[in-house]
Amino acid sequence: MEILKIVIIGAGIAGLATALALQNRETEVLVFDKNGGLETRGAALTLWSNGTYALKKLHVLEEVLEHSTILSMGNIYSSRGEQLESLPIHYSTPTVGIPRYVLLRILADRLWEGTIVWNKKVRGLTETEVKFEDGTSVEADMVIAADGIHSIARSQLTNDSLRYSGYTSWRGISSIKLSSEYEGTMTQFWGDGIRFGFLPLKGGMTYWFMTANAKEQVSERDEVLRCVGLLPNPAGTILEGQDHSQIIHLDIYDRRPIPKWSYGNVLLLGDSAHPMTPSLGLGACMALEDAVCFSDCYSSSKSINQIYGEYEALRVPRANAIVQLSKRIGMVGQIQQPLLVRLRDLIYPMVPRKWKQRVWDELYGFMNN
Ligand SMILES: Cc1cc2nc3c(=O)[nH]c(=O)nc-3n(C[C@H](O)[C@H](O)[C@H](O)COP(=O)(O)OP(=O)(O)OC[C@H]3O[C@@H](n4cnc5c(N)ncnc54)[C@H](O)[C@@H]3O)c2cc1C
């Protein structure tokens, strides 16, 4: 059996960023992933200033910016076209839109050769051993479980379950180039039980996503076409430029926040620790924050308990509060009853800007004002 010091399960944003953060400190680490290699297509992400600040600390921000569009304004409209929100974004590192697979490639390319081991699906863990489905195993002093919302480590260690949000989602990258009025802007439409958001990407492409209230596991990929008809343009036009076979359709879940992410030598990190609904667009940004914070806490001269304790003290309160806030914003965004929708659309713009600014600064300008 191979003896390793630090093993990371999952080569997603959390796993790759944590591996990079540790290797930037000359710390050896191996990453195991169930997939056969990196994604080469898919959807995109908004990386808010807190996420790009973490990328700066990982020394990859410049390369990320080469493949990103800079976003300086966030707008939300009702389905009748009234402006509900207008958020100027102005922190020390920019907010950007980037295809997710591009971000993954940038992170993976910076790792030492041989760091990622593909086709290694973890089937279970013990205190000192990670066991794979192919019958092999590795020993580790420290295991970082960055294996996402369906984390095998979390299921084994906590027995908690997923919470269905009450809505489903579709997203993709359309070949439609947005008109100049949408340059540098993230836009959302909030309708009756549906939301549609979009932003420009590099190369004249458009990232879009849509959510709609639905029973768990019953909606279908093509329903996005019916739902988009309920919203003003350019929603419909954007979908015209979408290759339907590439639409990603997912029911949205999170998990009830837990106060503890470490179990012996195993630490949950990224979505495995704090899976959240996408309503604030912060899951990947939080994974990047986790990575930087973890490497700041890490030192080979400290005990595992000390490292995990310091890390949890810094990360658990912020991440768990964001999980709950994201759930609540999702509930407001997905209101369906027409009278309540009207009420929401009247009240939302009246929330004092000063109060909202404070919340945005805490969420998106974290460490970055
Ligand atoms: C609709 C939608 C829109 C979103 N938009 C945004 C956004 O705009 N901005 C933002 O910041 N966030 C966004 N997010 C959230 C973001 O996608 C996640 O928070 C982020 O991907 C979490 O990264 P992760 O590495 O923790 O988990 P994942 O990305 O899920 O990666 C987990 C990795 O672990 C591997 N793995 C899983 N199980 C095993 C196993 N048993 N053995 C080995 N490997 C395993 C997987 O193959 C995968 O590579 C969005 C999410 C959704 C659903």
Image (cartoon, helix red, strand yellow):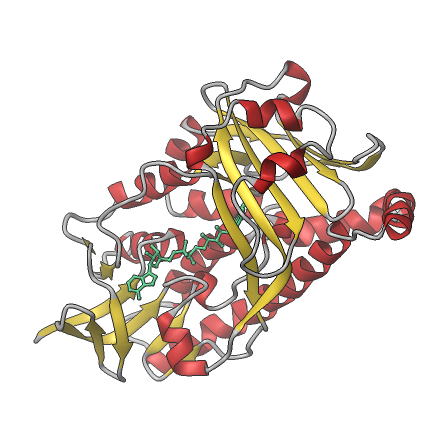
User: Along the horizontal axis of the image, is 310 left or right of 23?
Assistant: right
Q: The C terminus appears in which quarter of the rendering?
A: top right
Regarding residue 285, the answer to whether it shows in the image is: no
What percent of the width, then of the height, locates residue 143?
A: 29, 72
Q: The N terminus appears in which quarter of the rendering?
A: bottom left
User: Along the horizontal axis of the image, is 73 left or right of 102?
Assistant: right
What percent of the width, then of the height, locates residue 312?
A: 49, 73
What percent of the width, then of the height, locates residue 44?
A: 48, 38
Which residue is more in the foreground, 316 or 21? 316
Which residue is more in the foreground, 336 or 182? 336
Give the quadrant of ligand 1.
Answer: bottom left
How many numbered marks have been drawn onto this rendered protein structure? 0
Q: Residue at x 47, y 29 (%)?
A: 68
Q: Outermost residue, left direction?
A: 1
User: Along the horizontal axis of the image, is 88 left or right of 247?
Assistant: right
User: Along the horizontal axis of the image, is 297 left or right of 75?
Assistant: left
Q: Residue at x 56, y 64 (%)?
A: 254
Q: Quadrant of residue 166?
A: bottom right
Q: Residue at x 32, y 52 (%)?
A: 16
Q: Quadrant of residue 92?
A: top right
